[in-house]
Image: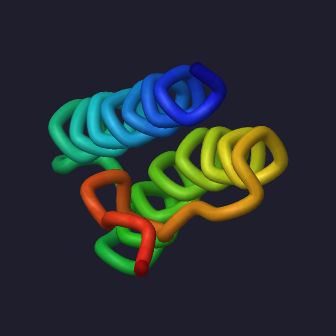
Amino acid sequence: MREKFGLIIHWIGFVLGIILSSSAGIFLHGFATKTFLLFLILVLFFIPFGLCWTIRRSLTGFAGFLPWKKKPD
C-alpha cells in the first residue's frame, strides 16, 4: 500500500514538474534570455519532482529517481 501511494506521489511530482517547466518555457520564450529560461525550466521541474521523490523515498525506503524504475531484486 505504501509503495503504491509513494508511486502516485512520485508521478504527481513528475507531471507537475513537466507542466510547470513547459508552461514557463512557452510563456517566457520571447521575453527571457535563453540562459535564464533554461535555468528557470530546470528549477521548475526539479523542485516539485525532487520533493515528491524525497517523499516516496521516505515512505518506501527505495525509489529510483525516475518513476518508472523498478526496485532491483
Q: How many marks?
A: 0
Tell me if residue 3 comes above or below residue 4 in the rendering.
Answer: below
What is the residue that sits farthest to the front in this orientation?
73
Tell me if residue 42 comes above or below residue 8 in the rendering.
Answer: below
- Residue 68 picture quarter: bottom left
Q: Residue at x 47, y 26 (%)?
A: 4
Q: Residue at x 19, y 49 (%)?
A: 29
Tell me if residue 6 comes above or below residue 47 in the rendering.
Answer: above
For residue 66, side relative to residue 13 (left or right):
left
Q: Position of residue 9 (x, y in %)?
A: 54, 27
Q: Judge by depth and name the residue closer to the eye, 55 or 45.
A: 55
Q: Position of residue 2 (x, y in %)?
A: 65, 27
Way the structure is coloured: rainbow
Quarter of the picture containing the C terminus is: bottom left
Q: Judge by depth and name the residue closer to the eye, 43 or 6.
A: 6
Q: Residue at x 38, y 34 (%)?
A: 11
Q: Residue at x 24, y 46 (%)?
A: 25
Quarter of the picture containing the N terminus is: top right
Q: Position of residue 58 (x, y in %)?
A: 83, 48
For residue 38, side relative to residue 47 (left or right):
left
For residue 57, side relative to residue 36 (left or right):
right
Q: Position of residue 30 (x, y in %)?
A: 18, 48
Q: Judge by depth and name the residue closer to the eye, 71 or 6.
A: 71
